[in-house]
């Protein structure tokens, strides 16, 4: 059974038939991983494009980094910007939107008045819960072709690659 990536790799293998640096197995694996991630990203974007609420994918991603970050129940805007891989200015804009919607609060840190702490409100937690489980279902749909055993094997192989990269 072949997929579109096999055709891609075959074309490049023919083009670079005398080039020892080209590794068809590496090309195939990386392109397939990119396609899987692209499918998930498109699926997520589609889900948020058709919701009945004024709640965007960026809103969810911001709430998500707040909910899963390593600090107990709060974070600074700078910590959230780093975790979300966005600029501080972009994070400020996102937090303004979430605060206006009643999904987060901003408070001055009692121990250091220079610090602002962001905390989810009960409504923010509820909104995150609503969308996280739908996202989990989309992620599982992306990998439904694999058995539990195969998922274990895939995780082991990917873990080995990440460890070799120092991640």
Image (cartoon, helix red, strand yellow):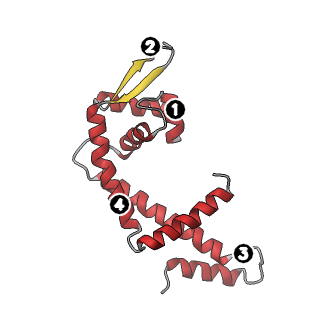
Q: Which residue is mark 2?
A: 110
Mark 2 vs mark 4: which is more N-terminal? 2
Badge number at residue 138: 4
User: Seen in the image, is 98 located left or right of residue 17?
Assistant: left
**Which quadrant would residue 121 be assigned to in this image?**
top left
Task: Give SS at disc 1.
Answer: helix
Mark 2 vs mark 1: which is more N-terminal? 1
User: Seen in the image, is 73 located left or right of residue 13?
Assistant: left
Mark 1 vs mark 4: which is more N-terminal? 1
Height in image: 41 above or below 14? above
- Which residue is at a point 30% across and 45% down the rendered structure image? 129
- Which residue is at a point 67% across and 56% down the rendered structure image? 165
Badge number at residue 22: 3
Q: Residues within 10 Å of mark 4 (few under 14, many from 20)?
A: some
Q: Whole-Å distance between the Cαs marked 4 and 3?
A: 34 Å
Mark 3 vs mark 2: which is more N-terminal? 3
- 121 or 15, which lies in front? 121
Q: Whole-Å distance between the Cαs marked 1 and 4?
A: 28 Å
Mark 3 vs mark 1: which is more N-terminal? 3
Q: Residues within 10 Å of mark 3 (few under 14, many from 20)?
A: some
């Amino acid at each position: 059974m072949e997929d579109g990536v096999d055709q891609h790799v075959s074309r490049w293998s023919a083009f670079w038939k005398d080039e020892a640096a080209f590794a068809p197995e590496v090309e195939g694996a990386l392109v397939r991983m990119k396609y899987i991630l692209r499918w998930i990203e498109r699926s997520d974007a589609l889900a948020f494009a058709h919701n009945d609420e004024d709640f965007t994918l960026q809103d969810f991603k911001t709430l998500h980094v707040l909910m899963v970050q390593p600090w107990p129940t709060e974070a600074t805007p700078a910590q959230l910007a780093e975790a979300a891989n966005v600029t501080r200015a972009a994070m400020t804009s996102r937090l303004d939107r979430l605060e206006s919607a009643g999904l987060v609060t901003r408070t001055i840190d009692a121990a250091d008045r220079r610090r602002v702490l962001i905390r989810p409100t009960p409504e923010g937690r509820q909104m995150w819960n609503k969308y996280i489980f739908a996202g989990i279902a989309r992620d599982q749909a992306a990998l439904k072709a694999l058995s539990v055993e195969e998922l274990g094997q895939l995780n082991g192989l990917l873990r080995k690659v990440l460890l070799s990269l120092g991640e």
